[in-house]
Image: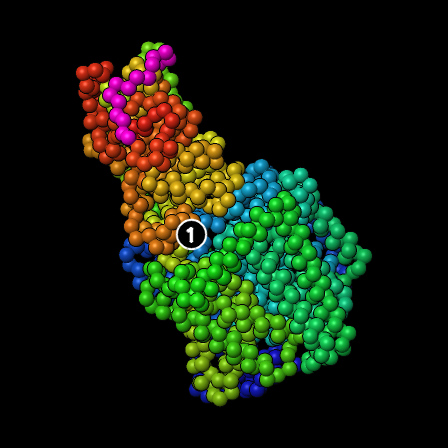
Amino acid sequence: MTITEQLPVIEPTPPAAATNEPTVMLDGGISRFALWLGLAVGTAMVSAAYVLAWSDPARTNIRYALLWGGLAVFLLPAFARLFDPLISRVERELVLLGLALFTVVPKFLRNPDGPLFFDELAHQAQSQRLLDNGELLARNPLIAVADAFPGLHAATAALAHLTGLSVWQVGVVIIVSAHLLSIFGIFRLAQLLTGNDRVSGIAAAVYALNPAFLFFNSQFAYQTLAITMLIWCLVFTVEASNPTADRRKRAGATALAIFLSSATIMTHHGSAFVLAGFLGIIALVLFIRSARGGVEGDHDGSDDQARDGAILVALVTGATVALGIAWLFIGSKGDASRVIDYLLVYPTNGAQEAFNIITGEASGKRTVFSSSNLPVWVQALGFLAPPLALAAGIKGFLVTRKMRQPHPAFPAFVLVAALYAVSLPLVLTRTGAEGAHRSFPFTWIALAVLGGIGLAAWHREAFTRSYDRGRTVQAVLVTLMVVVGVGNLATNANDTYLFPGPWVAGSDTRAYDAELSSITTWFEGQDIDGRIIADIYTGAPIAALADPSTGCRLAAACPDSIPIWHAYYDDELGEGTVTKLADDGFTWIVVERRLAEELPRSGFWFTREEPDAFTRAEPLPAESLERFAGRPWAHRVLSTRHYDVFRLDFDQQTLPVDVSNPPVPDTATLDEAAAPAPAEAAPAEPPAEPTTTTAPGATP
Amino acid sequence: MTAVSDPPVRDDDRGADPAVMNGIPVSVWMVGGAAVMVVLALLPEPLRALNLPVMLLLPGFALVTALLGAFRPSSLLARVISWLAASLASLAVVSTIVSLPDLELTRGRVLAGQVLVILGCAALAWLSPASNGEPTSTEPERRLVGQALAAMVVGVGLAVAAVAFGLATSEDPTVFIRMSLSDPEASAPLAHPGDGSTSVEVVVRNDDDQVRRFELVPAVEGVGGVAWDRVTFELPPGQEWVGEVAGPVPASGCLQRVGVKLRVDDADSNVNRLTRWVAGQDGVPCEPRNPVEAPPTTATAAADAPTSTVPADA
């Protein structure tokens, strides 16, 4: 008996007049075509939203309406189809296929031509370097521990080698694959746990509503691939623990689970930790249940079968822990402390901030949406989404409590889903919020299953009362699902992440505009033989794309290097700082002049640890940026409207300088600078007549 | 209207022939697939891209079929997705492992690694035959699936067109002008030759949206500075100009700064001047003509001061 068969059986007989009406429920013909028409119209509306973001950035509400309206045009009929118990499994899977592909569209349109988000830049650099030079476990220019988790980069380079596609093209393939794998992984997982297609389809749809699904986990980044490996590891683990399956199948599933587990471990640290914990909880639950005398209900196998399942999951868990520890040393080339220190930053700071808040110290406290530039109505939905999601999960939990558990591992998923509720208060802390947001895609794996059960139960209960009531409830449920999707995304991505548009201070996704791209292109032609001093938004694309061959190229991205903000924030650029910069191998400074005009949206220019991070009220003084111009070791070799690039040669630090060279403000004309010399000075050449040419060196 | 009830998951293991697919042993499918993969991987670009679906599915097909045997999440689509998961895992894990000995990932190793995985799975499937059979479906079900597929193809086609439209009409409208020195080794002090003159190669790129008239204003800066010949030129949008500015450098053993200012349409531009330090002539002592000595304000400042110079802009 399956989980929903244990719910009250319904016979929804619609009124005679209603049977011929086109409905989104129980009348597949019309809604099936409406669904796919919605896919096309929705995609067009989302595209229009992105076009509008460029052409008329001020029309905020219209582009949000287009984005969410476009998504709703497909999601509403898709969710409605998934509620329909009469559609075939194949069609249900086709709807899920459409859902997986459709949810790739917004992020794909955000940056179709190449990497943009900070993590994407880092992983593009790592993959490109692996493809070009074959260097495995080589330090990354932006993320200090990315080298130790090469699964994504190895898969990308391997695919690029064997298909001839570029790294970015392979990246897009992996992103699309990750969406497919996530949706179908949850579908399969829910099938195994609940034994019901309809519940499983709804669960997969609920997972697509998680805060990270549309954007964060649609990046070309290691967590995007790792979480899909984790989900499929859970699929095979649950399959292995299924007491009704034969021994050979369970052994094979165990082997596949360990294989997927090792892929997770080699790909992403956080996912590996979560997987170990998740598996540990499942193993614990199975052991407790087998110790209580086997599994009741549908899976009324013997104690031996239940114990076998527990042992197999314990085997997967043990292998995950052992492989994880081993890989920590292999991946870091023996320097595991480097990785551990990096990984402990967030938990340590988060715990400290939580402690501060509990003890009454305001440090670390964070106000949700305090600096958000999202429309108010979107922010409101952001507050609405968590309670709605929790309500569906609680409903699912209550439904399953009234009946015999469909699968022995089911309570483990209830426990993990509960962690979502536990993690929500952490969004009120600055560092904890980062961790909480990172945890949502994992806790939603379990919450999606419970939510799918809850939503299916509400739907069914409504139809037991009347057909009209059922249809109304269905409309409400699918609408609320879209509301949860909108609200969840609002908590995870602000306007600068969602939409392209003009340059925005302190935003990685808006800093990399055509002007900075031009500088990045210029750097590709240079011999970047050292490290780069720059704010993190300016330096990231240069360090990652121009020449990714040096680890920790950008000082702001590497916590083990000099606190680079000293070069900007100190009262003066003292000899001690200059010597430190020289010793650390810096050869370039890229100055973004708008640091003296704007405040960073993110709250910091370099790292979260910089002075006045999150509290800075005034832009940097202009002198902080102009201090490099007069140094004899700094040659300004490039300038655009907003950027200056200095080539550094600290060997010149000790060379004698003609101190008669007065400071020349950048705004002064050189006619003033090259004014006639005093009596004792050599006479200046008279200004020559301009030599007019018609762009002799002009090249496209 | 049919009564609504949640159908249980079907067990599609029924009727499965454990060792064959379309009448051919799965091991043979695997070996044949591996051969196709190798051939496609050796093709020149862009033909090699044909290998993409093979790489994304074949290793996973081999792994899932060999290890799970009759396990099948019922539909072809669901099976394909499970192959995709195992394939990506194989690409990540095996490509990493084969590269670990000397930390070098090469095309040959990647290919060899995947081939070994597939052949290993083929051997396992041969020794322990238990594989997928063909799914069974009824005629009405096939018809419904056909309708859904047709609708999906139309919808996806239109969606792709909409995406293409979005890509074609979205463009970063940022306009700017870029001026740079062309010499990548610009950091080294430029020692001017004995005749007391030197040159600097400059690149100007017009990424504005209209034709602009540019004027380069070069000079040796400072008291006793020298203005060099100016250069003017016009550039249409998207074009780049490369050329030299040259002029004399006063005799001095000191580092002196050459600045190149850019004027656009006879007005000062928002592009800062480029600066390059040039070395004085050999044998000429560096004697400041108009020394400016600012006393350090604090002990720290004195300690931090450069050892023998006072920066011009300090």
Residue found at x 18% / y 16%: A679
Q: Residue furthest front?
A: B299
Rendered location of residue A194, percent (x, y): 61, 75
Tag 1: amino acid: Arg
Q: Is residue A409 left or right of residue B269?
A: right
The residue closer to the viewer here, B162 or A638, is A638
Residue A19 highlighted magenta (yes or no): no
Q: Above or below — where is A288 with respect to A652?
A: below
Q: Secondary structure at mark 1?
A: loop
Q: Quadrant of residue B189?
A: top left
Q: Is residue B82 visible?
A: yes
Residue found at x 28% / y 16%: B250
Rendered location of residue B181, percent (x, y): 36, 28
The residue closer to the viewer here, A196 or A379, is A379
Residue picked out by circle 1: A608
**From the image, which quarter does the C terminus of chain B lie in?**
top left
Q: Which residues are magenta?
A: B281-295
The residue closer to the viewer here, A301 or A355, is A355
